[in-house]
Amino acid sequence: MKKGVKALIFLLVISLGFTGVTKAQNEEDEEKTAASGPKYGTDSTTCVLNFSLYREFAKQKNYKDALPHWRWVFQNCPLASQNTYIDGARIISSRIDESKDPAMREKYIDTLMMVYDQRITYFGREGYVLGRKGIDLYTYRTDKVEQIYPVLKKAVELSGKKSEGAVVVYYFRSVLGMVDIGKLDKSVIVDAYDLASDIVDHNIKVHKDDPKALANWENVKGNIEATFEPFANCTELIGIYDKKFAEKPNDIELLTKITSVLDRKRCTDSELFFKATENLHKLQPSAQSAYLMGSLNLEKNNISKAAEYMQQAVNLYEDDADKIKALNILANINFNQKNYSQARTNAYKILQIDPNYGKAYILIGDLYASSSSMCTDDDMGGKTVFWAAVDKYIKARSVDPSVEADANNKISQFSKHFPPASDLFFRDLNEGSSYTVGCWINETTTIRAAK
């Protein structure tokens, strides 16, 4: 008799899709679990039978008949498969949605939370699972924000930039909910926005070549921005952070948040942003903070300070594109200071990195053209500098098509300032011959007459 029962059970298991169990083993169950024990419990035959039965019913979305078999697996062989918990969330959610009795509905919600907790115990992935738990908690107990917030907060902390988009959205909403009931300070909204934005921006960048994923993350970004909008104006943000800055002006974490949020929301013309950036650079100097301080001082017309910070940025930057960006600004600052020789030196540093950076040649040409009044020892009123200037504009357009229009305009403009043919004849100078422009320029060029 016992042999007959065993044979019947075996045949039933086969007919209900034992291959499904095998597939689950291959795809899901080989993950390292967070707890140990017999995979199919103390009664492996009954475990496999109930697993197969509940899965067959679940595939048909017959969750009512799946429930008792699923419950047996959940209670007696929790290590059998991670599918127990994935399917369990669907089965219990269906019972919550169909339940008319409020008390029974609450019990089912408690069970759903237990499914997530047990999944973490036996299969880990705490950050990911807590995110799913938090979303369902928010869905079924929207008004219980004190229960929801810590779950989603921990989920985001554990998963970081690997957090799911929906989790980030619900986490941010839970923060606002905690502020609304007076459990969190208003400033936490800004901190949460900064954290959420970092995660979203990271994923938008990572998924830029995946249209579907990119669209999802851009939707998440829009959702968060819309939720944050009431707190997004500069007056509100500065009001939130001014007091904190006064209390902790040298707190690196706080300074990083202030500069990040104000920069993101384009509140960079505020005194708070300037002071926070300045303090952050003193405490934790970086190429980016040096560049930012250089730019801010330039806006305030603190030219010497701007040059000092921009030089630091040049020294600290490792990426060539960033270094060129800083050198270009520094060379123009030198130009503004009438330190023409230093400006040219920095322009040539750009060309050492990128010989085809036409703007550097344009700048050198402008330096030469601006020197006519200070280079009058050529006995032609300083007009020879325009030969050297035009040489640079010609070079600029030859290496960089993007500056061709600007170069041509300057060639036309400054060629008019070449010495007239009569002056060349009087000084025994022949067109086409070489000529060394003196002064600080000291470059050999070609003699040309004004047309």
Image (cartoon, rainbow, N blue to C red):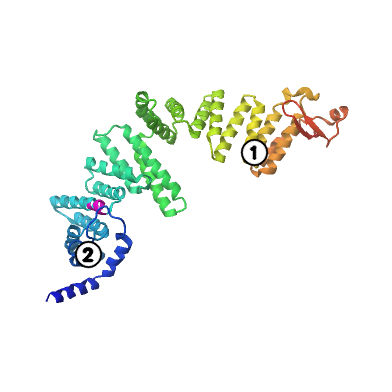
Specify whether residue 339 is in view.
yes
The amino acid type of the residue labelled 1 equals Leu
Residue 293 coordinates in the image, percent (x, y) = 50, 29
Q: Check disc 2 and give the amino acid type.
A: Phe
Quick check: 103 left or right of 406? left
Does the image show residue 449?
no
Name the quarter where the N terminus is drawn.
Answer: bottom left
Q: List x then y, in percent, for residue 388.
A: 74, 33
Q: Which residue is mark 1?
A: 351
Residue 45 among those drawn in magenta: no
Point out residue 157 in the picture as x, y percentages from the top left corner: 32, 42
Q: Which residue is mark 2?
A: 51
Prevailing SS of the magenta stretch: helix
Point out residue 359 in the picture as x, y percentages from the top left corner.
64, 37
Q: Nearer the viewer, residue 230 or 380?
A: 380
How far separated are the C-alphas under marks 2 and 1? 70 Å
Instruction: Say which mark, if any, is on residue 445.
Output: none
The local secondary structure at tag 1 comes to: helix
Residue interval drawn in magenta: 118-122
Mark 1 neighbour class, 10 Å CA radius: few under 14, some 14 to 19, many 20 or more: some
Instruction: Please give left or right for residue 316 compared with residue 338 in the image.
Output: left
User: Magenta includes 119?
Assistant: yes
Q: Is residue 314 left or right of residue 363?
A: left
Q: Answer with the quarter of the image where residue 60 lies.
A: bottom left
Which quadrant: the C terminus?
Answer: top right
Q: Residue at x 42, y 26 (%)?
A: 272
Answer yes or no: do the residues labelled 2 and 1 have beta carbons within 8 Å?
no
**Picture quadrant where residue 69 is located:** bottom left
As displayed, is residue 36 above or below residue 23?
above
Q: Determine whether the residue tagged by mark 2 lies in a helix, strand or loop.
A: helix
The residue nearer to you, when weighing 163 against 33, is 33
